[in-house]
């Protein structure tokens, strides 16, 4: 709500005279002081400091829960629910609450990236995707491809480099599809297979 | 059926159990806290198709889960430790399934907090539990589309687990460290250096109610699961050495006092008509401290029996959803201890 005279945002003191809202300054300038409450008198209102402190808390509470209206579009989990339970409701929550999640993860374990194994890889067991990747590396290149090197496009190279480093789980389906096309164009079959497997995994699910 | 914790284990004078828990989720579904009954059943069906029945021949699925009876609850928690210590793990039993082997040392629980929870449990100090759990997890990962992100690792509902999704827990009985001046503080510092955690198995108010503690891994990112295990092995070896050193100090420097308490503790456990859990665990602590030094041969109790008694008392609170009143539980407990010491159980 704003003062209808100067347009300033109205805070805790709102003066309404004849249906018009004024801020404290305008009310004084217009001689409407009588509508303002009397200066705080500690003796008259011994709890006023407490009221002020309580007011401060209310403002802080609003700040703390400023993001509480964020809701995951997939599972419907709200930020407040997540904060209360300490659990997320689905994979999409990792995107929805990304900023808070990363902050929380850093708080718990420091600024660290995942360094564990990939799914299905344990004690020398390789996933199907890994096998395909290795097979693709071993395949001889087509004679045409060996003879002619496609013209380099800096933009494509940049995108490929980004995809190489990207967390595939966090990319959208469209980004994955586009990335696959680019990777195939650049004959980066290992990347293309990774992107394809990620996409197939999502479609299969 | 002999349960996993009734077997012999390495360093069982200090380490009661080694537990490795690996959590995974299936892509395309919400996590269990946001799933409806149909989705839960779909997950149960998917897992049923791929579970290794040779390794996990026994199962409880949905309505057959014996969570609604007192005996069933006891079987799932205190007797087998297939589920955690919180009774609410039995909530919505119809949506869950459990696959487990003969001695309950390896199990897969479906829809308990995460879609898949692999548990490998071993008596004493046994790093093989890690390999058991990790192999089972990897086998499931090959057959199911697991939620995984290259940046965060395995995606879990509990963000503390996101990454490797793995927790390693050693349950240790350390009466000598607890009774030594500054012993527990020294241990806490050591545990923090390895970036692990130490928590009392059970607490009453702000105090630990026994000399049993759980040493647990924290890191799920920044280091591989194998590295976490390697650090855990170093830490647990330090703890074993420290506890044994403290026991030796007590046994050699305060022989008369400790041997007296050892005898009294055995007498109380063997003949008491009523005993509360704190008294019982304290008495078991004195037995543990002086057992290796007692040359009177009047008290004969194996480490297996001592550990079984300790586990029985620690997990006892999960046995009853409504505890017997009027001191009856103290009598039941005293009889149980007596029977185990006599060799009847």
Image (cartoon, rainbow, N blue to C red):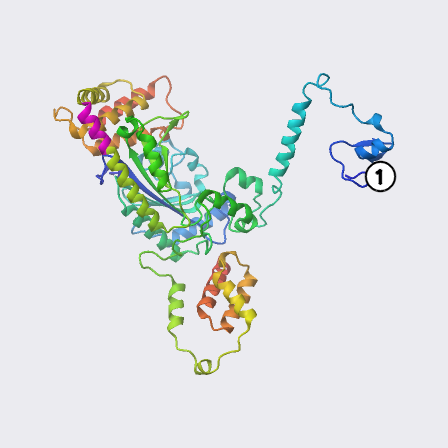
- Which residue matches tag 1? A5
| In-front residue for pair B108/B207 | B207
Q: Answer above or below: position of B276 versus A103.
A: above
- Secondary structure at numbered mark 1: loop
Q: Position of residue A127 (x, y in %)?
A: 38, 61
Near-viewer residue (A173 or B169): B169
Q: Is residue B21 found left or right of B155 in the rendered image?
A: left
Q: Is residue B237 visible?
A: yes
Within the image, what quadrant is residue A55 found in? top right
Residue B249 part of the magenta-drawn span: yes
On screen, residue B23 above or below B76:
below
Chain ID at mark 1: A
Image position, residue B180 (x, y; %): 28, 27
User: Does the magenta segment cover residue B279?
Assistant: no
Residue B344 lies in quadrant: top left
Q: What are the residue bounds of the magenta stretch?
A: B244-254
Tell me which secondary structure the magenta stretch mostly adopts: helix
Q: In the image, is B38 to the left or to the right of B332?
A: right
Q: How many marks overall?
A: 1
Residue B104 seen in render? no
Quadrant, the N terminus of chain A: top right
Against B189, is B256 above or below? Answer: above
Report the side of A86 relative to B245 (left or right): right
Would you identify the image quadrant in which residue B97 lies?
A: top left
Q: Position of residue A88 (x, y in %)?
A: 51, 45
Question: Which residue is pictured at 37% across the width and 22% down the height?
Answer: B324
Crowding around mark 1 (Cα neighbors within 10 Å: few <14, some 14 to 19, many 20+) is few
Who's the residue at 36% across and 54% down the image? B138
Going 56% across and 44% down the picture, which residue do you hit? A77
Task: From the top left corner, tell me how far across and down residue A146 is, in percent.
Answer: 44, 81
């Amino acid at each position: 709500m704003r003062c209808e005279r100067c347009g300033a945002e109205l805070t805790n003191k709102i003066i309404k005279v004849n249906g018009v809202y004024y801020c404290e300054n305008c009310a004084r300038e217009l001689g409407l002081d009588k509508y303002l409450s009397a200066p705080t008198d500690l003796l008259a209102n011994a709890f006023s400091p407490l009221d002020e402190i309580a007011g401060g808390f209310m403002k802080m509470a609003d700040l703390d829960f400023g993001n509480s209206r964020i809701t995951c579009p997939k599972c419907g989990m709200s930020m407040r629910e997540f904060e209360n339970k300490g659990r997320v409701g689905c994979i999409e929550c990792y995107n929805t609450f990304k900023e808070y999640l990363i902050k929380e993860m850093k708080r718990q374990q420091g600024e660290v990236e995942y360094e564990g194994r990939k799914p299905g890889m344990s004690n020398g067991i390789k996933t199907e995707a890994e096998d395909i990747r290795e097979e693709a590396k071993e395949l001889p290149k087509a004679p045409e491809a060996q003879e002619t090197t496609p013209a380099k496009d800096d933009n494509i190279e940049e995108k490929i480099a980004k995809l190489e480093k990207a967390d595939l789980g966090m990319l959208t389906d469209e980004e994955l599809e586009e990335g696959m096309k680019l990777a195939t164009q650049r004959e980066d079959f290992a990347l293309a297979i990774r992107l394809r497997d990620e996409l197939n995994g999502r479609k299969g699910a | 059926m002999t349960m996993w914790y009734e077997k012999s284990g390495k360093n069982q004078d200090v380490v009661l159990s080694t537990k490795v828990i690996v959590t995974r989720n299936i892509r395309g579904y919400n996590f269990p806290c946001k799933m409806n009954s149909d989705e839960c059943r779909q997950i149960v069906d998917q897992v049923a198709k791929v579970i290794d029945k040779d390794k996990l021949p026994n199962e409880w699925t949905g309505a057959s889960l014996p969570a609604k009876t007192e005996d069933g609850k006891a079987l799932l928690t205190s007797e087998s430790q297939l589920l955690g210590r919180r009774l609410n793990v039995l909530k919505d039993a119809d949506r869950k399934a459990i696959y487990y082997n003969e001695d309950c040392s390896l199990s897969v629980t479906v829809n308990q907090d995460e879609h898949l929870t692999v548990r490998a449990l071993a008596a004493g100090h046994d790093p093989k539990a890690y390999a058991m759990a990790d192999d089972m997890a990897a086998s499931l990962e090959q057959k199911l589309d697991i939620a995984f992100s290259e940046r965060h690792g395995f995606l879990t509902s509990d963000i503390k687990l996101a990454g490797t999704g793995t927790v390693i827990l050693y349950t240790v009985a350390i009466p000598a460290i607890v009774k030594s001046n500054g012993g527990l503080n020294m241990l806490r510092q050591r545990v923090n250096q390895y970036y692990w955690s130490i928590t009392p198995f059970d607490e009453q108010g702000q105090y630990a109610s026994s000399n049993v503690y759980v040493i647990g891994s924290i890191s799920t990112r920044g280091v591989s699961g194998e590295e976490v295990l390697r650090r855990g092995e170093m830490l647990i070896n330090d703890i074993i050495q420290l506890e044994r050193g403290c026991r030796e100090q007590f046994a050699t420097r305060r022989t008369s006092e400790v041997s007296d308490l050892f005898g009294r503790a055995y007498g109380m456990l063997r003949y008491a008509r009523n005993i509360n859990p704190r008294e019982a665990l304290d008495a078991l602590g004195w037995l543990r401290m002086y057992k290796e030094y007692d040359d009177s041969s009047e008290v004969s109790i194996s480490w297996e029996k001592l550990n079984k008694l300790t586990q029985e008392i620690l997990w006892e609170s999960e046995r009853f959803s409504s505890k017997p009143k009027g001191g009856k539980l103290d009598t039941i407990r005293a009889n149980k201890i007596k029977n185990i010491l006599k060799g009847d159980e």
